[in-house]
Image (spheres, helix red, strand yellow):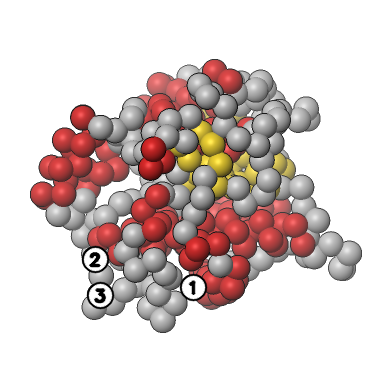
Amino acid sequence: MADTRTSGARGKRGWNATDLPDLTGRTAVVTGANSGLGLVTAEALARAGAHVVIAVRDLARGGAAAAKVGGSTEVRRLDLADLESVREFAAGWDRPLDLLINNAGVMMLPERRTQQGFELQFGTNHLGHFALTNLLLPHITDRVVTVSSAYHRLGDGVIHFDDVNLTGRYTPTRAYAQSKLANLLFTLELQRRLSEAGSPVRALSAHPGYAATNLQSHHANPLARAAMAVGNRLFAQTDRAGALPTLYAACQDLPGASYVGPSGLGEMRGAPALVGRSPAASDPGAARRLWTLSEELTGVEWQLKPAGRP
């Protein structure tokens, strides 16, 4: 299969989805692709020739999304808040997978739990994607892109290893920030393990900046929901612009563990480029500790052996 990556370690001014290389013959899974950034990402990949698997909880909504996306698409059920659903999805995968786009997420919801009893934002945004990536890894040939957020800098700025469910101290912002920090630490440790195993697969992260999507409409605080609705209309960039960092990370020749976001003021908007992250998101010790904890919580373990070992 031809290598579709293009050169350039930093986003160039004006880069957009029309700059995607020809992805004919390649397969991509996009989680949460029935709306928002996921739908835009799926559309762009399909227009570039990729076969796109729309991985969603609701097959009816996924079918409607596939009709919008057009091109070569299929819909498969995946509920990231249920590890049994994640296992079923992965067990049904039997062919090479070029791109895994870990896009789906929930944001600042009232306190709720997943099917296995984990705090919903950490369980969906991190643990679900952690399990999915590891179970699919034997099939992945090119890269894993996990969507994080500039919000990883907020909350307490740490992973609460003693209680990731935030029992008795839950706030929507604290939980969301923890889950997005986990996305970055997951990518960091995933890339370290891939490199150690001699794998050509690369792990990268991206964030959309301030993009107008329906993700903000579920905030637990009605005043915050109203403020975000106004912000979406007046200040946010479009969902198409918000998807560009993910698409850039999916096709450009970037180093493993790269983090891509908008290049404008405050990383709120602008062309995609490599961006910085908080010191907590760059901590290899925390990344390894999170990986070990995530294996314990999900029951999904690392499958690739280090290079040179039987």
The residue under the point 49% across, 73% down is 297
Type of the residue with mark 1: Leu
Label 2: element kind: loop
Q: Is there CB contact under 8 Å for labels 1 and 2?
A: no
Q: What residue is shown with label 3?
A: 169
For the C terminus, the quadrant is bottom right
Q: Which mark is residue 297?
A: 1
In the image, is 164 to the left or to the right of 92? Answer: left
Q: Position of residue 110 (x, y in %)?
A: 21, 60
Q: Position of residue 105 (x, y in %)?
A: 38, 49
Judge whether residue 254 can be spotted in this image: yes
Q: Which mark is residue 230?
A: none
In the image, residue 251 sits, relative to residue 114, either above or below, namely: above
Type of the residue with mark 2: Thr
The residue under the point 38% across, 42% down is 266
Q: Is there CB contact under 8 Å for labels 2 and 3?
A: yes
Give the CA separation, mark 2 to mark 3: 7 Å
The residue most toward the front is: 265
Mark 1 / mark 2, whichever is N-terminal:
2
The residue under the point 60% across, 35% down is 10
Q: What residue is shown with label 2?
A: 171
The residue most toward the bottom is: 162
Type of the residue with mark 3: Arg
